[in-house]
Image: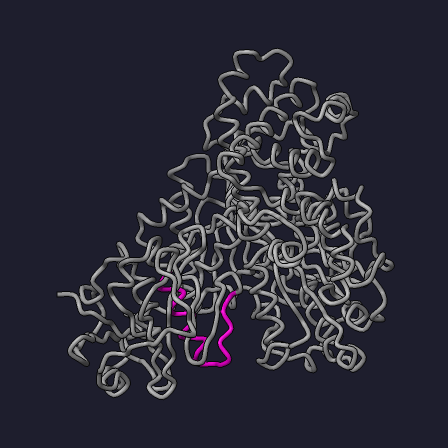
Amino acid sequence: MIAKYFLLSDRVISHLLQSRQLRGLKADFSAFHGVHRVALGEEVEALAVGGELPSEFVALVNSEAFSGLAGSPDVVLTRIGRLLAEAGRPPIHLPRSWAEYHSKNCITFFAQPEDQGRQRWLAAVDSLKRVIGFLDVSDKRKQVRLEDWNPDFPQFTSYADWASKIPPPSAEASDESFSSQVDLETIGSKAVAQGYVYEEWRARLRPEQLRVVDAPADESIRVIGPAGSGKTLALCMRALRLARDMNFINTRQKILIVTHSWAMTERIDGVLQALNGGTYPSLIDVAPLLYLLQAHAGAVGQIATSVLGEDSADGQKQVMDLVGRSVEELSSRQLQKKSGLSSHLIEAIGAEQSSRVRSDLVLDLYEEIIGILSPTGTFPDAGDKVAEYLSAERDETLPPFKSKADREFVLAVYAKILEQLVDLGSVTTDQLVADAIRVFETFSWNVRRETEGYDYILIDELQLFDSQERLAISLLSRSKPGMEFLSVEDPSQGLFSRVNERTKALKARESYYLEEPHRFRAGLVDFIAFLYRKFPLNQIPLKFSTSEAVVRKPRLFVISSQEGRAEWCRQKVASVMAAKDKARRICFVCLGDEDQLVYDALKDADYSVVRMMSYDDVEKLSYQKRSVVIAQWQYVGGTQFTDVALMIPPVARPANAHARLRELTSIYLGTSRASSDLDIVCTARVPEIIQEAKKDRLITETKSVVPQR
């Protein structure tokens, strides 16, 4: 019989996640192996793995409420574990997408992402007993006002007295081959702050970073630099300097940091808190753009509340899903016509949904619709604008829809997307942005601007924002018409960098260039510099210094067969696990559909695997100890790993300038996530940029085995 309540330590949660024993939310906790159990009360069963500390908080989970949740048990337990960790270092500060709300010692928050159901935990903190009770769940059918909720804890004896007598697991059982925790804090905020506070960093910053931090407060700045050059650190340091400026404090000026996703928001939150000595700076707000638009424009005018995605990144993913479905519905009809369609478009329309050529078409269509059609108001039924779009001259760096028939297909896809949105009763994030801009241009917002606007705005990863989003950011300013801001960007990582050259929003007075990446080993830094200089947007040559550390050039493996690549992946993981350095973290960054091959290969070998398939999937890394990370290249921005294996699928040579630029972007973004070791695995076709680097002796080609390092 399953107990009504279970007591779980953070160590138990980590054990259950990494040992992959969870098969559903209705699982009986008492059935798991490697876990000690005891009844501590008539209704309470306690679980421990050994090594639990008396000072740690433990979770008291209502098993019936737990079983009634929808979605992934991994995510639910991850969030429970996160709250346990936060309770140990008050005040509790959860990711903003969880929508936490406090009343006295009680807290409620989303038990899982909103798209998996709007169910919320009702939890109560007992600081004396070091217990957090996850006692009930609320949802649309069962709404509970937290102020009126009376938590009812069952009776049980001391968990700490029992758990402290259990010896910690042996070294063999704990298997500390990977870093003790691979999570967003480890690969994100900790990688930026590196354990130093604001005052310590001021003595460590390079001169160009310090110029950014200390620039006059009334100066709008654009900071440009390659991956690993310290852009995020400079942004957070400047925000803190302004927040500590007595003029800002005395005049109650408001500072805003705008991000593209909740994951990036959490990363910035973590950096600010670490730099500020563990406390969050009160003058600074950090939030995704979509949340800000809904909060401010929604308070002034009528804007849609049903939006695809909880932030810009999630919205992008969901719109791309709509694009994919629209292409599938239109494919047979278009292939029957064929008249005037480009050969590459015919090939992509007829390809399998999971193929690389089809996914490239979906991304091309997304960029065309969101980056070109939507910002200009070119809807399928907008006669004059449609005519202008169909006949316009085409820059070869834009998505490759050159013929009139190609662009008519784009418009057909756009029309199909709009039909689906009507059926869903929702709007896309770019449509919400357009609506918000119209609200911000009203007299009502000008009246509220003085109280709700911001005095200084900082934008993280500007290259991820399209032209409409940049305009919306500028309208959040308290001052009109100008605003003071700082933006940090690496144009090489952005979908919309080329399109955004035309926008007038966010024109900086000064541009600062961070010319020296600092997180890469010698050998790797030379290759990253080589890739960076290949981008046409990077007109100013950057300075790259090489350290005196041992040179480790990236290695190239050419393996034609799927079986061979799968075996290589298994050997690579085994090599990292056998290394003496226990802090190594490995990520397989995949282009195309290689992520499925890697995932199957490592799961067959019984490795613990975390798969990232969106920007916000970094949440999956919390409490996933000693796990191998597999990610699509689009979703690894802002992370850092010691080891990266870039997996390049067997695809044809890019057919046009736009496709070549995308391939370069994917290789650059993927390889720049490594700080120490980089391996590139190709099939018979090796991209030209990799061949050129090999010719320049920046890459070493080796046999299809993984030597120990």
Report the magenta stretch's main SS. Answer: helix
Percent position of residue 60, x then y: 29, 74
Compare residues 672 and 494 and report the one nearer the observer: 494
Q: Residue at x 56, y 65 (%)?
A: 266
Whether residue 61 can be seen here: yes
Q: Residue furthest left?
A: 1
Residue 157, compared with residue 466, is above or below; it is: below
* Quarter residue 15 falls in: bottom left
* Quarter residue 339 falls in: top right
Q: Is residue 654 magenta?
A: no
Percent position of residue 16, x then y: 30, 64
Mark count:
0
Percent position of residue 708, x then y: 45, 58
Compare residues 37 and 430 and report the one nearer the observer: 430
* Quarter residue 404 falls in: top right
Q: Residue at x 55, y 17 (%)?
A: 334
Compare residues 146 and 479 and report the one nearer the observer: 146
Which quadrant of the figure contains the N terminus?
bottom left
Q: Residue furthest right?
A: 509
Residue 288 falls left or right of residue 604: right
Residue 10 falls left or right of residue 315: left
Residue 574, compared with residue 248, is above or below; it is: above
Whether residue 523 can be seen here: no
Magenta range: 76-95
Percent position of residue 120, x then y: 40, 62
Residue 329, compared with residue 369, is above or below; it is: above
Residue 264, compared with residue 668, is above or below; it is: below
